[in-house]
Image (tube, grey):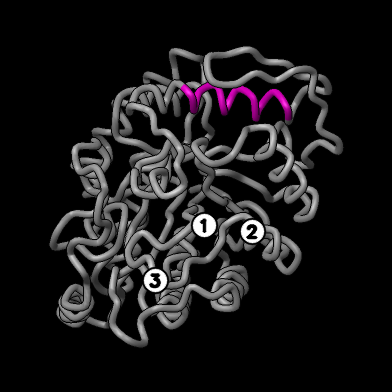
Amino acid sequence: MTQRFHPPTETIRLGFWAPVYGNWIFSKQPGTHNASFDYTRQLTLLAEEIGFATLLLAEHTFNPFDPESDQLETWTSTAGLATITKHIELMPAVRPTFKHPVLTAKMAGNIDQMSGGRMAINLVSGWWQKESDAMGIASLPHDDRYQRSEEYLTILKGLWTQPHFSFSGQYYQVNDVTLAPPPVRKPHPRIYLGGESDIAQRLAAKLADDYLINGRPVEEAKQLIDHVRPYAAEYGRHLQFGISAFVICRKTEEEAWEEHARLHAMRVEEAIPGVDRKVQMIRTYAYRRGAVGSNGGTDAGLVGTPQQIADRLWAFHDIGVTTFLLQFHPMLEEMQRFGEDVVPLLEKSNVWRHPACGEAHHV
């Protein structure tokens, strides 16, 4: 194998999307859908065994792809996983539209205590109007949502790090609140934030720990990272980067693309009726026609042989991506295949180690 040279920064962190909607191919065909807690439990325990470092649980009250299909509840599931896992980070999404920041801070802090310091959040500024309408909750224009999110994150950080916290803003008022016990994780639970608009990128640079990117080719991901990094530098901060990707691994490239065609044939192209397709995230790589998976999916290029997939992961790492939020189908079988065929190649690169074995030594 050709020796690879990586930036002397963070190691590769493997993560996965829990199938809270039932699958990540947007299929309604029989046998493709499992949104049960038991299935996510099995996946999470397998992921820990393989060496995944984090999992993301997207948040919706009811299924956006099919209102009559099962939808796994995010925060109660996260709490359940906290009690049966040992090292994997737990990253539930949270949407300011539906949860007050004091409530979120308390729940996250409690789950952090339950898990021994493994809590994180993915702040989502909200993009599905039909869910708000169903609950009779007024929505905000795009930029206003991110202004509210800035207040939200400011309050979360303040409550997690200060014994007495007060805040007065346009959207929230907090008066001398103490949350005890505080989170175990220091300085606070890790904060992930995505979004393709400039205001989203600037908010991530200012207050998030990781900026999440929709899957796309390496060259385009590099352009985006190079664009966002200076925003973080303006605040004297070091921002980390993660990317979403759908994995299709087979012995040959031809077999992998045959599987891509099979999965795509099961996809319902109009996956989210009522979504605002003028939103920047939707207009880029979020749910592109012709791709498999969500949030960029196979546009990240993780379709091919184990070596091709490992090479692509290395290429992303070379440009500064450290966290990979992966999707598979069927989840359990394909995650196992990834663990058997791709992970050993990553381990040989010496920039990845099983989280239970400590940090890797960089070459």
Q: Is residue 144 magenta?
A: no
Of the numbered discs 1 and 3, the one sitting upstream in the chain is 1
Q: Evaluate if marks 1 and 2 touch, with contact meaning CB atoms under 8 Å apart.
A: yes
> What kind of residue is marked 3?
Glu
Give the mark toward the camera: 3 or 2: 3
Q: Position of residue 153 (x, y in %)?
A: 57, 28
Can you identify the residue that label 1 sits on?
A: 57
Frontmost residue, 236 versus 268: 268
Is 304 placed left or right of 192 in the picture? left
Q: Which residues are magenta?
A: 148-159
- Residue 355: name its quadrant: bottom right
Can you identify the residue that label 3 sits on?
A: 68
Circle 1 residues within 10 Å: few <14, some 14–19, many ≥20: many
Vertical relation: 305 (above or below) 192? below
> What kind of residue is marked 1?
Leu
Circle 3 residues within 10 Å: few <14, some 14–19, many ≥20: few
SS majority, magenta: helix
> What kind of residue is marked 2?
Thr
| Total numbered labels | 3
Whole-angstrom CA distance, mark 1 to mark 3, is: 20 Å
Q: Position of residue 149 (x, y in %)?
A: 49, 28
Can you identify the residue that label 2 sits on?
A: 78
